[in-house]
Image (spheres, grey):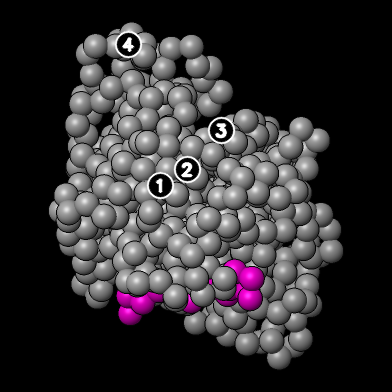
Amino acid sequence: MLGEEDKDSNQAVVAGGGAHVVAFPFPAQGHIAPMVQLSKTLASYGIAITFIIATPHLASVRALVEDSFEGHGKIQIICFEIPPQYVNTDMHNFYDLMFYLPKNKHEVFAEIVQKLMAPQDVTAFNHHQPSPISHSSSSTIGSFWFSSPVCIISDMLLGWTQDTATKFKIPRYCLYTCAARSLSMIWHATNWVAQGLIPMPLDAAKPLQIPGFPPLSPIDLPEVYLQGNEMKFPPQRLVDYAKKHKEATGEPPGCLFWCSYQVANDALNVFLKLFVPTIFTIGPLLLTHNNKLEESKVDGIDNDCLQFLNQQPRSSVLYICFGTVFVLPTQQLNELAMGLETSGVRFLWVIRIPKGEDGNLAPEIATLIPKGFMERTKDKGLVYTSWAPQAQILAHPATGGFLTHCGWNSIMESISMGVPMITWPLYADQMLNGRFCVDVLNIAIAVDKKFKEIVGRKEVERVVQLLMQDATSNIVRKNARELKKVVRNANEPGGSSRKSLDLFVDDLNAMTLLKKLNCL
């Protein structure tokens, strides 16, 4: 419980007109991070946030959230449990989790919102399951005296939360954490399915045409669109979510996009035409309002990455990371290692260690890569197996390139820092993201990667040297630097992202004022 002095202080803040919103990300790190950034930014505008997270027992994710919110007195966290088997973030569990949450946690989410809609009851809620409301800027368990929320902001994969928003007659805003162009492809794909063009055979001769994309071959598409692949989470589900969003009662709903308008204007027009009356392009929010990278907490171990970079020449290091979900097979790790070694390029390689047959982590990274590799490359490279501060790595002057799996968060971070990329997509929308970066934005070089085949060391050596040492990459570097300016200008006062964010905050505060007037 907060003391009476704190209670009065918080009530005064609420009485001053600040809105209160519920933020609910899909419980995977790539989806949590954008919602964390959005929540911190809204809090800086005076908006109160209740942040709901479904993985309290996943220590790294819980730490990410709590550390990120440290010192933000207008953010509170609510946690609820999910079964441990869904915490192992491989793709199988990722898809299973999409079905588990609406089936098993729909009522839990509704209960949380119901309690928040009656602030006088929040103290009682604090002592029952789901887990308590906790004050993130102190380690104590307490309760905030926020007014009832005016809206829900939930992830694109949590379309079922619209039912709760409708029940309590508040709008739901959908946060899209992937590329607008990739989503545009999903909308078109529903028509292609009806026409028999999808599932698409791997040897299809006729490419697919999507606005904003070059002609697409089968290798460019997510696996769910290919023949012989089971659609565990059919793209039609996202289309159904969007239609439900459009048909929702209450205030006209809007969508939040994790990009600047200049990066995806043509694709965003698809949403305006088909699904929503309002869009807010609010990304990337990893930059503060003065367009400087917000320093995150990095402990002594994680500082090893930055210490390594501090010792390297400017723009000389290739940063390599394949995200938080997919684990490369040992054979592919070996080929990548040998290609790096023969390329002679300096590198910082963050490896997610796969689990062994017994379910435990491999005891040493040396068992997964060629014998002697780390010793032979110690003067030029660092292999790292812990969480790494990616945004700070990409912002470091020594970083000259990024070999990426093409997750949208990683792409937006790389664009924001003006770092050219090598695209090595693995699943879902990443193939489309990669093609967009290579053939539309021209800020990346693609790995020549066949469907489900191992990329050989010669190809690794070729593409690494092409980006880091060959003069032909100059145009890619120039374009990356120019796009960085565009994105950063969008975050300046008067820029598209800043204006969009300001308008969204104005809408939230207007809803709060209207709500108070209706209560008079």
Q: Callout 3: 10 Å neighbours few (<14), some, many (20+)?
A: some
Residue at numbered disc 1: 342
| Amino acid marked by disc 1 | Thr
Q: Position of residue 281 (x, y in %)?
A: 31, 56
The quarter of the rendered structure image containing the N terminus is: bottom right
> Mark 4 or mark 1, which is nearer to you?
1
Q: Callout 4: 10 Å neighbours few (<14), some, many (20+)?
A: few
> Mark 3 or mark 1, which is nearer to you?
1
Which of 86/5 is in front? 86
Q: State left or right for residue 367 relative to residue 166.
A: right
Element type where label 3 sits in the image = helix
Spatial distance from mark 3 to mark 4, Cα to Cα? 26 Å
| Amino acid marked by disc 3 | Gln
Residue 396 lies in the magenta-colored region: no
| Amino acid marked by disc 4 | Asp
The span shown in magenta is: 290-302
Residue at numbered disc 2: 338
Spatial distance from mark 4 to mark 2, Cα to Cα? 31 Å
Residue at numbered disc 3: 331
Q: Position of residue 494 (x, y in %)?
A: 21, 72
> Mark 4 or mark 2, which is nearer to you?
2
Residue at numbered disc 4: 203
